[in-house]
Image (spheres, rainbow, N blue to C red):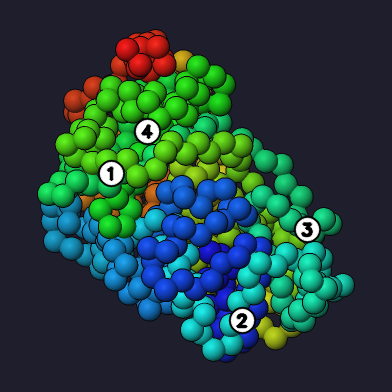
Amino acid sequence: MAGLAAALAVARAGHSAVVVERDHVTAQDGPEDAFDVVRKGIPHFQQPHTFLPRGRKVLRELAPDVIDLLLDAGAEEQDLAAKLSGPRQPGDEDLVYLWVRRPVVEWALRRAAAAEPGIRLVAGRHITSLVPGASGFHLDNGEAVCADVVVDALGRYRCPPGWPRASARPSECGAIYYCRYFALNPGAEHVTGPWLLNPRGDLGYMGFNTFRGDNRTFAVIFLVPNADHDLRVLKDDHAWMAAARAITPLDVMTSPDHAYPITDVMPMSGLANIDRTAGSGVPGLVPVGDALCHTDPAFAYGLSFALVHAQALGRASATHTTPADLTEAYLADVGPEARERHTFAIETDAARAKAWSGTPVDISRRDGCYPLFAFAAALAAAPHDDLVLRRTVGRIGLLDRVSVFDTDSDLHGRIERIWAGLTRARPGPPRDELLRRITPERVSS
């Protein structure tokens, strides 16, 4: 998706682009065909993605026609400003999530790229190497594609041998994700409650999160510590459903009266935070999306940052004429924010791992476990205070730099006071009890 978005950005800035895709994909006739595409190069193709408010804002600026395609295909917008108790203010129009599944997003971007003059789509081909000096690349059929700038949208997984990238030290996210998608039954609606966005929670030893999708679908994800091998039984569909029945409000969301599963359980592991914002050192080789910086998928930064990087590349291509100047300007534009969010993800992952290991953490005060105070406590407090809502959505939705939240002492005081007055209950049973409920022997009986 980062490659398609980058192609649209530079083409609409007046340049031509060639997009090379290793899988055999085409601009399908309809979004329903997108789920049948075989994407061996993208292990997380069917996993939840979403447009954070910043991603939706950038897409509306960059390619409003793509937003129209997505909405026509069944994507849903969720306006969090509707939860404000007071009058709307300038900027509240951006407090909107756009919910849609990854295959539909890719279908819309590819359809727009296929219709864009100046974009050539090449499917079913591998890039084997760069032309010396990054003035193009070679394909596995021997073709050499000439270019002033080569965009590295190869993601975080596999690159051609010897492909130049900045060295990086991966930091493990510390969790395995077990996801399953559901579709609402006729007459059923998405559950509503006291949460800011969608239901999420923490059991003290694992967590869960939910994402809406397009066309009345939603995903439920269990987040399990890497080290907890017993809970890996959640990869089994029956064990997964038994766990959902033991947790509020997942018991309602996944009940046969409310919704039905449309996928098996999809595990996702081997996840790490990786910062490559130093660049490859090769002028004219520009990393975008996960190739620039990858963070824990729980924060859902990937799709939105792919669009942010594409937009920045479009700006750089409109004002800089040499590959070296463009590369330098682009990295100076996107690097600081990406590094900031990389640090944010590492700190929050470490705090989460500490809490799940059984170490007491205090998330009720700013001078306690600040990463979880600024995340979990803020999310719980947001529906009760307009300033907290705006600042929290700005932080998690990438609308603000993290310093806007982190330096606001009045905001922190409000969160502390609201948290102290909330009634809280753990949404599910203790670990040992959950394991008893989800063991294959008990589930089968």
The answer to which image quadrant residue 138 occupies is bottom right
- x 75%, y 66%: residue: 127
| Residue receiving disc 4 | 208
The mark nearer the N terminus, 1 or 3, is 3
Distance from disc 1 to disc 3, alpha carbons, whole Å, reads 39 Å
- At numbered mark 1, what does the secondary structure look like: helix, strand or loop? loop
The mark nearer the N terminus, 4 or 3, is 3
What's the residue type where badge 2 is placed?
A: Arg
- Depth check: give the residue in front, 17 or 28: 28
The mark nearer the N terminus, 4 or 2, is 2
- x 50%, y 36%: residue: 267
Q: Are marks 1 and 2 in contact (CB under 8 Å)?
A: no
What's the residue type where badge 1 is placed?
A: Asn
Residue 83 in percent (x, y) is at 18, 52
| Residue receiving disc 3 | 160
What's the residue type where badge 4 is placed?
A: Phe
Looking at the picture, does residue 367 appear above or below residue 50? above
Distance from disc 4 to disc 2, alpha carbons, whole Å, reads 41 Å
The mark nearer the N terminus, 1 or 2, is 2
Q: Is residue 12 visible?
A: no
How many residues crowd around disc 2 within 10 Å: few (fewer than 14), some, or many (20 or more)?
A: some
Q: Which mark is residue 120?
A: 2
Q: Which mark is residue 198?
A: 1
